[in-house]
Image (cartoon, grey):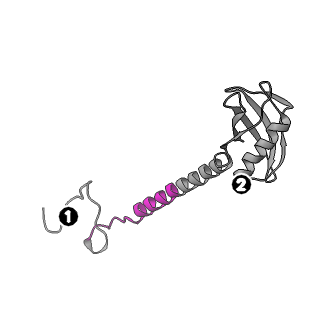
């Protein structure tokens, strides 16, 4: 091979650019892709956290259990005894019940339950009253 002949370019190298140097490989596109992927992942995590918080706020914060006692007679509790007991339990917890409606009479005993409709702070609720014993001790979960 003479000095005027040039060797064939290798298929594994880049052809020389101006000035005899191989073109420089840019990493800007790879860095941009990584940054955008991280931002997208962060956005998904934030949106997921907001949705989870909204679901929990709508269902989890307001479901709680209160306790009380109502007067019983012959293994039953009358509406006139249960409703004031529920009002008192809610007021003791800081709520303002404006309406409480329970069945006229309900059997009382361990594990027996009754459903009452309520309006607390101008929001409609359903209360599940579960009696703990035959003396009218109860727990109430408001949904």
Element assignment for label 1: loop
Q: Which of the 4 image quarters holds residue 33?
A: bottom left
Q: Position of residue 21 (x, y in %)?
A: 26, 70
The residue at the point 72 percent across, 33 percent down is 136
In the image, residue 142 sits, relative to residue 47, either above or below, namely above
Q: Which residues are magenta?
A: 21-42
Q: Earlier in the sequence, mark 2 or mark 1?
A: 1
- Report the quarter where the C terminus lies: top right
The answer to whether residue 42 shows anywhere in this view is yes
Q: Residues within 10 Å of mark 1 (few under 14, many from 20)?
A: few
Please tell me the numbered disc located at residue 26.
none
Across and down, in percent, residue 102 comes to 83, 36
Q: Is residue 98 left or right of residue 134?
A: right
List the residue tagged with mark 1: 6
Residue 1 lies in the magenta-colored region: no
Residue at the spot x=31%, y=73% of the render? 18
Query: Where residue 25 sits in the image (x, y, percent)?
Result: 34, 64
**31 or 107: which is nearer to us?**
107
> x, y (%) of residue 134?
71, 27
Closer to the observer: label 2 or label 1?
2
Q: Point out the residue furthest to the bottom here.
A: 19
Q: Is residue 94 above or below residue 70?
A: below
Which residue is tagged 2? 94
Instruction: Decide which of 42, 100 is in the foreground and name it.
Output: 100
């Amino acid at each position: 091979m003479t000095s005027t002949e040039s060797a064939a370019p290798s298929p594994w190298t880049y052809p020389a650019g101006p000035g005899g140097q191989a073109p420089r490989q840019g990493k800007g596109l790879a860095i941009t892709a990584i940054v955008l992927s991280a931002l997208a992942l962060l956005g998904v995590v934030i949106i997921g956290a907001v949705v989870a918080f909204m679901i929990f706020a709508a269902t989890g914060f307001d479901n709680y259990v209160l306790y009380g006692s109502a007067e019983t007679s012959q293994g039953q509790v009358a509406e006139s005894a249960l409703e004031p007991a529920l009002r008192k339990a809610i007021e003791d917890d800081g709520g303002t019940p404006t309406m409480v409606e329970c069945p006229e009479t309900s059997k009382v005993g361990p594990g027996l339950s009754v459903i009452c409709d309520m309006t607390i702070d101008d929001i409609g609720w359903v209360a599940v009253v579960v009696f703990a014993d035959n003396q009218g001790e109860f727990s109430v979960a408001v949904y």
